[in-house]
Image (spheres, coloured by chain):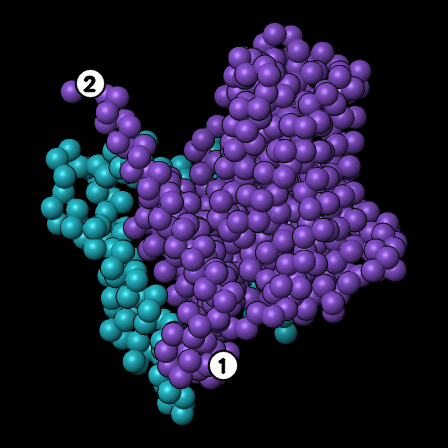
Chain colours: A cyan, B purple
Amino acid sequence: MPDIKRLSSRTHDLLGAALGLFALVMLISSPWQVDTTGPDPFYKGPLIFPLSVLSMMILASLPFWRRLLMPPPGARWHLDGQGVPWRTLKVLGLLTFFLAGLVGVGLEIATPGFLLAALWVVEERSKVRLVMIPVCVTLVLWIFFKWLLDVWFPMPLLFVPFSG
Amino acid sequence: MFEHLFAGFTAAFTLGNLAALFAGSLVGIVVGILPGLGPMVGMVVLLPFSFSFAPEIALSLLLGVFCGGYFGGGIPAVLMRMPGVPSSLITSFDGYPLTQQGQAQTALSATLLGSLGGGVISVAVLVFLAPILAHVAASFGPPEYLAAGTFGVVLVIMAFRNRLFEGLLLLGLGFWFSTVGIDGATLSQRFTFGTLVIQNGLDIVPICLGLFGVGQTLLLVERKILQTQEMHLSRSTLDFSKLIPLFRYWKTLIRSGLIGTLIGLLPGTGSILASFMSYDAAKRFSPEKHLFGKGTPEGCIASEAGNNAVPAGAMIPLLTLGIPGDAISAVLLGVFTINGIYPGPLLLVKEPVLINTLYWSMLLINIVCFGMLALWLRPFSLIVKVPGKLLAVSIMAVSIVGIYAVNTRMFDACVAVVMGVLGYILLRMEWPIVNLVMGVVLGDIMENRLRQTLSLGDGGLGILFERPITLFILIGTLLVIVVPLIMDYRKARRLAESSPP
C-alpha cells in the first residue's frame, strides 16, 4: 500500500538517491578500495560480496532517482511534515562538542558541561535539576567506568602541557 | 542431560547472576514503561557495562532488560492507553477500556499473568526445541547456512514490503558496513580509505548504540513522553484476588504463548505481529468475541502472552544456527562473540552449562519481573511521569562514554554519533531501521557462507538445488515471497470491489 506522506516527501527521495549515489561511487572505486592482490579466484575473493550488495543498493535507489528527477504533484521538501528539528540540531551540535570535550578536557569536565548545556537547550529551567542531573550522571559514569571498571581515558589535551 | 540442567540451575542461582538478572529486569521494566525508549535502548546502554562480566552474567543482565521491557510496556498501555513498547498497543485495546470501567486491577492482573505465562511457555518451547533444531543444524554445511540466511533476509524484507526499496537500501548499507575493514578470509583491506583506524571494521556495538541509544533519544528531545496525567490505580500493589479468576483463560494463555514463540523464531517479524496474531486468534476462538475491544481480560492476556514469548522464541535461531532473528538478538550475539562463544549447533554440546544457565535465568527473569511489578505497581507506574528530555540527554552521555569504554577507541564514539544522526533521520522518516541492523549482523555470516558455497560449487550456486535441506529452505523462501504478495493482491481486489465506483 503506497504511503502518501512518504511519496510526497522529496527528502525521502533525496536520501534514497544519495544512498544509491554513495553505492555507485563505492562500486566504481571498489577495485582501488579493495585489495585483490591475493591468489584467490574471484568467487572466493574479497570483492564478490561488496559488489553484489552495492549493485543491490543501486538498483533499489532507482525509484528514488526517478521521483527525485520527476517529482509527483504535491511533493515538497520535508522530513516527516513536523517541521525543522532545531532543538535536536542544537543537542546534536552539543554532542559533537562533547566528543571533542572528552579528548580536550576529559570526562569530569566534558560530561557535566554537555549535560548542563543540553538541559538548557531542552528548556529545563529548574536550578536544582540543572545542577543535580549533570553532577549525578558524571558521578555515576566516573564510578562505573573509571573506578569500578578501570577504563583508560586519555589525558585531556588541555592538561598535557602541565603534565611534565 | 539432567546433570547439565542441575549445573545450570546452580549457576543461575549464584549471587552474581541473581544480581544481574534483578538489575536487568529493573532497567528493562523502567525503559519498557517509558514510551519512546523500549528494551533496545536499555540493552545498548547497559551493553558496555556487561563486557566486564562473565558471559552468563552479562546475558542475564541483558535478557533481563529484554524481557523486562515487554513486561513494563503493558502497564502504561493499560493505565493510560499509552503503550510503553509498540507491541503493547494491542494490550491497550482491552486494558484501557477495563481501566475506564474501574477495573484497572483486573486489567493489570491479566496483563501480568499474560506476560508471565507467555514468558514461561516460550522458555519451555526453547528448552524442548533448541536441542532438536541444533541436531538438525549439526548436519548443516555452508550451503544450508547460506539458504537459512537468505530465508532470514527475505523474511525481513517481506516484513517491511510496504517499504521495499527503503528496506533493500538499508539492508544493502548494513551488508556494506559489514565488509568494511580487514577481510577475515584473505586479510585484504576493504574500504578503509587508507586509514588505520577503520582497519578493525565497523563494530555492531557502536552501530546499534548509535542507532538506538543516540538516534532514539534525539527523537525524544523533541517529543514529550507523557501525553496524559490520567492514572487510575486503586492500590500500590497488584490485587492478587483478581488474578485467580483469570486462570480460566488458560487455553488463550497457552495458545498465545505458542504463537508468540513461533513468531519470535522467525527473523524480522517482531513483537507487534506476535501480539496482534495472538490477540486475533484469541478473538476468533473466544466465546466472548463481542467483548473484544470493549474491555476483556482475555484480550490483555493474549496480547501480552504473545509479545512476552518473543524473547525466548528469538533465542532459538540464535542459539541453534547462530543467526539472530532481530536487532536485540543481534546485540546478544555480540555478547556471545566478545566472550569467545560462537552460537550454532555445536553450542549446545560445547557449552551445555551456559545454555542451561540461560534457560533457568530466563525463567527466573519472568518470575522476577512479575514479582517486581506486582509488588511495586504504583512506584513503577509513576516512572512514566519522568520528563523524557531529562532522560534523553542523560542517556546520550551514558551511551557515548559507554561506547568509548568498550574498546577505549574514540573512533567508536564517533561512529555512534554518526549512526545516531542516521538513526534519527530514519526513525523520523519511518524507514525500516531493523533492516540496517540485520544487514550488519547477517553480512558477515552471509558473505562467508556465500564464498564457501561458491567454492564447493566450483564458482556456481547450483549446489544449492542439489541438497534436500537447502532445497526445502529455498522453497520456504519462495513461499515467503509469493504468499504475502498473493494475499496483498487479494486484499487490494476485495477493497476495490467493495469501494463504490
Q: Identity of the amino acid at label 1?
A: Ala
User: Which image quadrant: the N terminus of chain B?
Assistant: bottom right
Q: Sequence order check: which comes first, mark 1 or mark 2?
A: 1
Tag 2: amino acid: Pro
Using the image as rendered, state which of residue A158 and residue B409 is in the foreground: B409
Residue holding disc 1? B185
Residue occupied by mark 2: B500
Quarter of the rendering containing residue B320: bottom right
Q: Residue at x 48, y 48 (%)?
A: B268
Q: Which mark is residue B341?
A: none
Do marks 1 and 2 share a chain?
yes
Q: Position of residue A44 (x, y in %)?
A: 41, 82
* Residue in view at x 62 percent, y 33 percent: B256
Do labels 1 and 2 touch, CB within 8 Å? no
User: Between residues B457 and B24, which one lies in front from this camera angle?
Assistant: B457
Q: Quadrant where the C terminus of chain B lies?
A: top left
Reply above or below: B328 against B111.
below
